Image: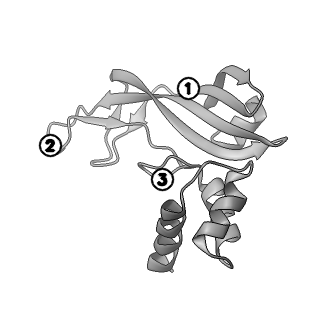
Amino acid sequence: MEELLKSLDSDLVLIEAVVGEETIELHAKRETDEETCPYCGATSKSVHSVYRKTISDLPIQEKMVKIILHKRLFFCRNTDCSRALFSETLSFVDRYGRRTNRLTKKIKEIAMNMSARSAKKVVNEGISNISDDTILRILKKTTDHS
C-alpha cells in the first residue's frame, strides 16, 4: 500500500490501511518539513492545523480506494502575501478535487463515447461513486481546456 501512495507523491507516508468488504481506506500524510505558499512563493515550517481530506483513487482488486489525507494548513510568514494561511499543494489531485487525476482520466476515457447516464452505471460498478452531473462537469472541463 505504501508503494501505491509513493506512486502518487514520494512524500506521502502510510499511517494506516483499513481493508473492508467493498473499500480500502488508506490514511496518509505528507512528510515534509516545509511547504511553499502557492500565492507568494515563500516557504513556511509553521503549521496552523491539520484536517482530513478524502480523495478517491482507482480501485484495487475490485475494491474502491479512498485516501484519507491528513492535510496540513500552514501560516504564510511573508507579510506582503495576500493570504495568511495556505494548505499543502498536491500534484496528484486538483486544488479542490475529490478524485486523483488518474481516476478522473479513467472516468473521462469511459465517458467519452457514451452518455453520462451509461457512463455513470459503468463507473459506479466498482470504480467510484459518481453522478452523471459530475461526469458531465468532468467532460466539460476537458473540452474547456483542450
Looking at the image, is 127 positioned above or below residue 15? below
Instruction: State which tag comes first along the sequence, 1 or 3.
Output: 1
Identify the secondary structure beneath mark 2: loop
Instruction: State which tag comes first along the sequence, 1 or 2.
Output: 1
- Report, in whole angstroms, how far the alpha carbon at label 3 lies from the one at label 2: 26 Å
Q: According to the image, label 2 marks what residue? A: 80
The circle on residue 94 is 3
Report the residue at 68% width, 57% height from top: 123
- Report, in whole angstroms, how far the alpha carbon at label 1 lies from the one at label 2: 27 Å
Is 70 positioned to the left or the right of 102 in the image?
A: left
Is 101 positioned to the left or the right of 80 in the image?
A: right
Amino acid beneath label 1: Glu
Amino acid beneath label 3: Asp
Q: Which is nearer the eye, 25 or 87?
A: 25
Looking at the image, is 110 positioned above or below residue 19? below
Q: According to the image, label 1 marks what residue? A: 31
Q: Do callouts 1 and 2 mark residues in contact (Cβ within 8 Å)? A: no
Whole-percent x and y of residue 22? 75, 34
